[in-house]
Amino acid sequence: MMNNIQEWILLLLIFGVISAIGNWIGYGILPLAAVPGMIVLILVSLAGLILQKLLKVNIPSVAYVALIGIIISLPGFPGSETVVRWTTEVNLLALATPILAYAGIAIGRSWTDFKKLGWRSVVVAMLVMVGTFLGSALIAELVLRMQGII
């Protein structure tokens, strides 16, 4: 497990650096301003990965990461105001870019496995992506109209 933790730390640090650069270039937030929030996000992610390995419950690590993130940002939790202030300096899209790039590389490395799934899985994947996009756009449209922004 110690080997996994070292790999996770390295990977999370790489994602953090790339995200901080993307945050700076895309959103004008200086890396120094984003570092505290990035460290919080890295530590929360690492804690979720470790919890998933330690607890023998069949729950994905992303659920633990989300749960930890929700708990530490709840009003009334000690230090939550600081955590929220720090993490607001990190833009979500700056985080998503390196993660999606890594996912693309991971799929590219196992292209033979991907080809075994067949053309039907490509159609399903495309429909899921289109549905997710359209659903997100619809929700955003409704919320923005309800708030009178558009």
Image: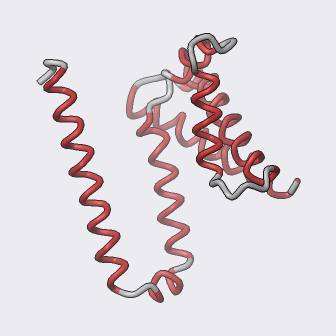
Name the quadrant containing residue 15.
top right
Name the quadrant containing residue 109.
bottom right
**Residue 59 point in image, percent of width and height:** 65, 54
**65 up-or-down from 23: above or below:** below
**Residue 57 point in image, percent of width and height:** 73, 55
Scheme of colours in the image:
secondary structure
What residue sits 46% from the left and 55% below the top?
100
> Is residue 54 left or right of 62 when viewed as pictured?
right
Residue placed furthest toward the right: 2
Of residue 119 and residue 14, the one placed in the foreground of this image is: 119
Of residue 111 and residue 23, the one placed in the foreground of this image is: 111
Q: Quadrant of the N terminus?
A: bottom right
| One can see residue 127 in this view | yes
**91 up-or-down from 14: above or below:** above
Q: Quadrant of the C terminus?
A: top left
Of residue 115 and residue 34, the one placed in the foreground of this image is: 115
> Is residue 78 left or right of 27 when viewed as pictured?
right
**48 up-or-down from 113: above or below:** above
**Residue 108 point in image, percent of width and height:** 50, 74
What residue sits 54% from the left and 15% below the top?
85
Residue placed furthest toward the front: 57
**Residue 126 point in image, percent of width and height:** 29, 68
Q: How many marks?
A: 0
Of residue 38 and residue 135, the one placed in the foreground of this image is: 135
What residue sits 33% from the left and 83% below the top?
120
| One can see residue 6 in this view | no
